[in-house]
Amino acid sequence: MSVKIHTIALLLLSVCLCCQLSAARRASRRRPCCVQVTSRNMSAEVVGETYREQAAGSPCVKAIIFHTNDGPLCADPIAQWVMDLAANMTKV
């Protein structure tokens, strides 16, 4: 093979490697997501004054995420207790 072909092959390999590293870096910065939600009233467990919404996108499901002393709580956004609690909190 000629030097020109080797150079092009090496350049393409470098581009592919950079793209894979970039994608891996973006994936590692993503927040963990809710893959299931609870409809059971857990309002007594919620701490703080903020919540966040999560959109559905495989494998994540649509959820309202509250904070508890045990970590994030993934709640069903159409549950009445969730709507009532979120109405009195700040969305972040």
Image (cartoon, helix red, strand yellow):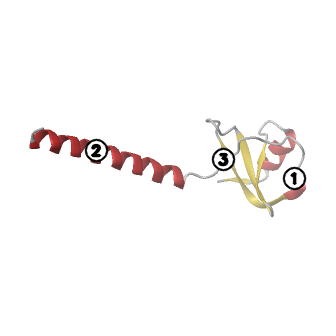
| Residues at circles 3 and 2 in contact by the CB criterion of under 8 Å | no
Q: Amino acid at mark 1?
A: Ser
What residue sits right under mark 1 in the picture? 43
The image quadrant that residue 8 belongs to is top left
Res. 13 mark = 2
Point out residue 36 in the picture as x, y percentages from the top left corner: 76, 41
**Which mark's residue is nearer the viewer, 3 or 1?**
3
Q: Quadrant of the N terminus?
A: top left
> On the picture, is 73 further left or further right than 23?
right
Counting other residues with Cα less than 10 Å from the Cα at mark 3, is it few (<14), some (14-19), or many (20 or more)? some
Q: Amino acid at mark 3?
A: Cys
Q: Earlier in the sequence, mark 1 or mark 2?
A: 2
The image quadrant that residue 90 belongs to is bottom right
> Image height check: is 31 above or below 78?
below
Q: How many marks on residues? A: 3
> On the picture, is 6 further left or further right than 46?
left
Point out residue 52 in the picture as x, y percentages from the top left corner: 68, 50
* Point 88% across, 51% down: residue: 42
Q: Earlier in the sequence, mark 3 or mark 1?
A: 3
**Which mark's residue is nearer the viewer, 3 or 2?**
2
| Residues at circles 3 and 1 in contact by the CB criterion of under 8 Å | no
What residue sits right under mark 3 in the picture? 33
Q: CA distance from mark 3 to mark 1?
A: 20 Å
